[in-house]
Image (spheres, rainbow, N blue to C red):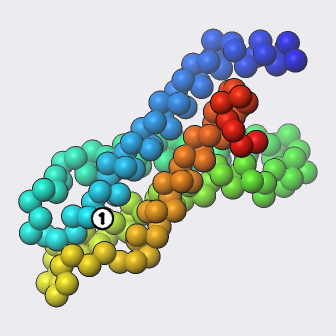
């Protein structure tokens, strides 16, 4: 246990954990400032929608998803290089599900909201304020998954702060 504690609290591991924490924070904030509020500004006559804020939030969101996606892929490749049994035994666990599904849902939500916004800009729609039901459900499901992902990250660092284990 002492060896693991020394490795876990080494300067490199602490810096990596800090960088992951910052990226988790950016992922959550950019999702809440990007696709989630844009859903309520689907009318092309809505003047309260700020395209610049949406663009910055979406770019930050994609950067965070790419960072975590490459991290998940590299972890999977490292596990496969060590042992195929280790890779396959870990591939379908709850924690690997919690690593990948929120990222896929964030990509789906941001792409779908962007497509709806582009469609509304170029096509005359009768019901200008209609929000597609599947998009509401997807955004409503993505937010708790992002929080669970953050709790999974906290669980690794401090088991007392993470209430679900």
Q: Residues within 10 Å of mark 1 (few under 14, many from 20)?
A: many
| Placement of 34 over or under 28, stated as above or below | below
Q: Is residue 14 left or right of residue 130?
A: right
Q: Quadrant of the N terminus?
A: top right
View extreme (bottom): residue:
126
In terms of depth relative to the viewer, which is nearer, 127 or 30? Answer: 127
| Placement of 154 over or under 66, stated as above or below | above
Q: In the image, residue 161 lies at what x, y percent?
A: 66, 30
| Placement of 142 over or under 55, stated as above or below | below
SS at mark 1 in the image: loop
Q: State the residue position of label 1.
A: 39
Q: Is residue 37 visible?
A: yes
Q: Quadrant of the C terminus?
A: top right
Residue at image coords 78%, 16%:
5
Q: Is residue 124 left or right of residue 59?
A: left
Q: In the image, residue 160 lies at what x, y percent?
A: 71, 28
Q: Is residue 155 left or right of residue 106?
A: right
Q: Quadrant of residue 122?
A: bottom left
Q: In the image, residue 151 lies at what x, y percent?
A: 62, 40
Q: Is residue 110 left or right of residue 103?
A: left
Q: Is residue 71 visible?
A: no
Residue at image coords 71%, 51%:
96
Residue at image coords 64%, 49%:
99
**Marker count (numbered):** 1
Q: In the image, residue 102 lies at what x, y percent?
A: 56, 55
């Amino acid at each position: 246990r002492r060896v693991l504690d020394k490795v876990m609290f080494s300067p490199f591991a602490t810096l990596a954990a800090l960088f992951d924490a910052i990226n988790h924070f950016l992922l959550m904030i950019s999702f809440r400032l990007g696709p989630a509020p844009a859903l309520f500004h689907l009318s092309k006559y809505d003047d309260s929608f700020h395209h610049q804020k949406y663009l910055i939030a979406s770019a930050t969101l994609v950067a965070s998803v790419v960072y975590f996606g490459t991290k998940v892929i590299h972890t999977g490749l490292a596990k496969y290089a060590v042992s195929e049994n280790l890779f396959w035994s870990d591939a379908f666990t709850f924690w690997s599900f919690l690593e990948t599904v929120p990222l896929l849902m964030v990509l789906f939500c941001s792409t779908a909201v962007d497509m709806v916004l582009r469609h509304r800009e170029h096509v005359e729609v009768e019901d200008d304020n209609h929000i597609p039901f599947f998009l509401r459900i997807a955004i409503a499901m993505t937010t708790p998954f992002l929080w669970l992902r953050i709790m999974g990250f906290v669980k690794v660092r401090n088991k007392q702060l993470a209430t679900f284990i």
